[in-house]
Image (spheres, helix red, strand yellow):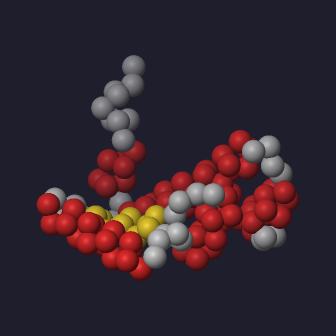
Amino acid sequence: MLNKELLASPWDLVNELADDDLKQLFELDDILVDISLKIINYRIDNNLSQKQLAEKLDISQSMVSKLESGEYNPTVEQLWKISKKLGWSFKVIMEDEKSEIQQIWDIFDSYDSDEMCDISQRAIKLGESA
């Protein structure tokens, strides 16, 4: 019988056996796979071929294939454009590993500068209360 504790998390194994460079590669691959799965699931859920999705995104079918492979590292701008065309919100979250403080950048399209200022102030206050 398999020891479930040994199989609890593949990240435990990576953290134990890999050096820092390899850990970083695993982390990047994990992000790229998440992106590819989001795009694949959207395409399948909407019964689209890669060619049809490419037309919707105004990119080539080969670019859709690259994005779905998980081996292509798209730019933030590319991801933002894809999210807008698919009706998704787009957020970049960066966390300080030591203090667990989060900084969140949201892409706001419909807010004027006064509303953005108010939102920024609320975010600052939220960070102070953490």
Residue 90 can be seen, yes or no = yes
Q: Residue furthest bottom?
A: 113
Residue 8 percent location from the top left of the image: 35, 36
Query: Which residue sits at x=33%, y=76%?
Result: 117
Query: Which residue sits at x=41%, y=80%?
Result: 113
Q: How many marks?
A: 0
> Of 28 and 47, which appears nearest the observer?
47
In the rendered view, would you say 83 is above or below 45?
A: below
Query: Which residue sits at x=52%, y=63%?
Result: 90
Q: Residue furthest top?
A: 1
Relative to 43, 77 lies left or right: left
> Of 19 and 53, which appears nearest the observer?
53
Residue 60 percent location from the top left of the image: 81, 70
Query: In the rendered view of the protein, which quadrant contains the N terminus?
Result: top left
The quarter holding residue 5 reads top left
Residue 93 percent location from the top left of the image: 38, 65
Query: In the rendered view of the protein, which quadrant contains the C terminus?
Result: bottom left
Relative to 103, 129 lies left or right: left
Query: Which residue sits at x=37%, y=53%?
Result: 14
Residue 36 can be seen, yes or no = no
The quarter holding residue 83 reads bottom right
